[in-house]
Amino acid sequence: MLDPVTFDRLFFALSMAFHMIFVTITMGLSILVSIYELRYIKSKKIEYKVLAKKLAKALVLSFAFGTASGTLIAFELFSLFPKFMAVASQVAILPFYVEVFAFFLETIALIMYFYFWENFKNLYAHWFLSILVIIGTASSAILITMINAFMNTPTGFNIANFISTGKITDVNPWAVFNGPSTWSEEYHVITTTYAAAGFMMLAIFSYYYKKTKDRIAEIMKNGMKTSSIFAGISILLAGISGHFTELMLLTEQPLKYAAIELNFYPATSNAPELIGGLYYNNSTYFYISIPNLQSLLAYFPSGNGYLPGLYEYPASLWPPLYIHLTFDLMVFGGILLGIFALILFVSIIFKKDIFNKRTIINGSIISGFLAMAVYDAGWVTNEVGRQPWIIYNVMTVEEAANVSSVIIPIGFSIMVFYLVSIPITILYILKILKVKVEEISNV
Amino acid sequence: MTLLENLELFFNASIFAIFFTIASTELMAGSMLIFYYKETNEEIKKFIVPIWEITGTFLVFYVVNVEALVPSLIPILAYVYIPYILLFIFVYGARNGFIIFAEFIGKTFAITEEQLYKLYGFVTLILGTLLLIAYGSLISGVGVDLNNYSFDLFQYLSYWPDAGFVLGSALIYFGLAHSFFRVEKNYKLSLSLTVFGVLMNSLSFIYFTNFKFYNYLILPIVFTLIIPVMNQFYYTRKYARNKILYLILMSLTVGITEKAILPYLFGGKINVIDYFPNSAIQVAMFQATIIGGTLVGIFLAYYFYFYFKKIERNV
């Protein structure tokens, strides 16, 4: 039988995992919808309008489930981890609060955009609503990430005093907007989210390209090209931001850094990069070691500088070491996606039509799944890497959790509900995006 | 109570009032979809399908405002209401699922659009009941054990003002739904239902608050009864069925009632001012509420302006 703390953790992790699927789809679709409507306005090609409407419908569906799962998370945060919220509300509530206004912007702009589409005479005024949706979705993501950055590197109050007395003093409510890890995390979260969304859309368009022909296949191919450019730019920026995020960990969360690199001993130079590796019974198995690479990446070009090790900290504070593997999956999966996007990008630049090749179509479909796996692996690395803390070095998950045993049966029902409803929703989003011949002729 | 604290309570009451008013349109829609689907579904869908997302957004707004207003009260609320909160979010997820699929799936699945809308109506009424129970117990404190952090639903429902509050609200909204969604059938009965509901609710409220705030009830009673009374007469029916009038009057009704209750909760056992955060957060929240609230007001005003100008006028 699960204890309530473990259940709270599992329940919240599952809710977040599902929520992120819809957030990713929503953020990506909001950009594509805007691109296609603008193309329609400029070219008056009916295909673009059909695609924009299809994408907008999928966006509304994804947004609706995203807001539902987001609302559940808002409730779960204070009901599953009440002591965390009691602290966060006294120090770092502003991003949460401001996010609600971004959420309003997103909601109202999207429902006007979708439901009142034909009531707008000025096409640019209607298109402008899609820009507001993009701003709303991106702002929501940025503001919520600030809370996550606060959990990783708390700021804005007297931490030493809180640890010794339990009292919150010297509060600066604005500090959370510019904490030690805020902007490096923002940069990485936004770019990776757009990259994951871009590859997912590439996969969907490729799937339908494979299944359709003639005019509809051409529309899908166009979608493949657009989403591959979008995914390619995002994955490039995600790679750069990932490097800076890791450098930030070196100074702000050295224990997490040591765990994701599987460094047991600190080093000041010549540290190797471990690829793979299972830690069991105080030994590491199944890995490849690349000499000096870790030092070089962290302190380019000299390679000289301090790299933390796990043995510098009590073992009771170590996060689960499988995060080294999720980190590897994130990095190598990201590199593969980057290479694939580069191939597609180069083909577009040199006007080589490779999008009809079976390898590229199948590769594009696989890239969607891989991108989601990479994205989730990144979040697992980030969140599990902070364990046992909910607020790093301030409050453990165990201290924050609601230990009422009644959570388990109802929480379990909600998890089952998620497991049933979410695949149906995703399948329906896919179904919505299917363009039929008559739709083009009817518009 | 300082001016800032007073203003923050005022904002909190206002957010709750707008949230509850918008949510009440869904409660009315729920009852109409169940009882008069054929007569009302077109009218309801036109209003509810875009707005149900805004209800959810306002719910989040209210929850986050409460978290910011009384952070140290959160652990108490979380432990007392945990089964009801989880049940609420489960039903809330189902409500969203039903309305989304009702709107988009149509006839393609084994379940029909009508069945999905009725299911949406049914779960919305359950949500409304849960909300009213939680709200009633927050005011009266009946069934709540603050020492053991628990809530006994049966104790709550066996106290007649608590049960009366839920039943009275159900009658009020069922009655008001006739004018809001322009239902011709039984519209004469709707006045009697609303009057009876208002009577039950007012008596419950007087008992809830130990006879302290009954003078605050005069305006809410008048505001609630104006619409069903106007709906009875040919010349005023057009105005009674104007949705903007309902939204304004119901916001005022709920706002006045809420402001009368605050700052005391659980039958006066808790004064929320004692749970307010440090002054730095209070000032920052105040500033954010002013700026953000103005923006939300502009967004909503534009939305309703557009809705009533382009959509409602085309009926």
Image (tube, coloured by chain):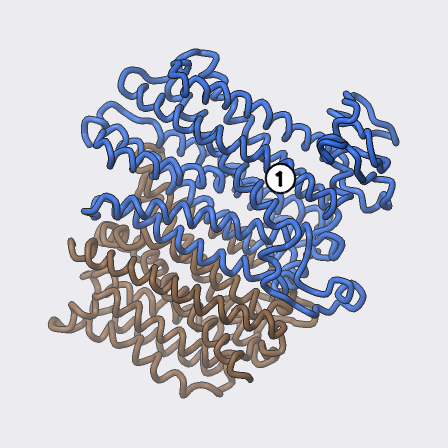
Chain colours: A blue, B brown
Task: Say if residue A395 shows up in the picture.
Answer: yes
Residue A35 or residue B31, whichever sits in front? A35
Q: Is residue A183 above or below residue B263?
A: above
Residue B145 or residue A265, whichever sits in front? A265
Chain of the residue under the numbered disc 1 shown in the image: A
Residue shown at 36% from the left, 62% from the top:
B22
Residue A158's spot in the image, x, y percent?
72, 65
Task: Say if residue B111 shows up in the picture.
Answer: no
Residue B286's spot in the image, x, y percent?
50, 71
Circle 1 residues within 10 Å: few <14, some 14–19, many ≥20: some
In the image, taking residue B283 as reference, residue B11 lies left or right, namely left
In the image, taking residue A262 as reference, residue A443 lies left or right, namely left
Residue shown at 28% from the left, 60% from the top:
B304
Secondary element under disc 1, as helix, strand or loop, is helix
Number of numbered discs: 1
Residue A265 or residue B145, whichever sits in front? A265
Residue type, label 1: Trp
Quarter of the image where the N terminus of chain A is located: top right
Residue shown at 52% from the left, 20% from the top:
A340
Q: Is residue A213 above or below residue A74?
A: above
Which quadrant of the figure has residue B144? bottom right
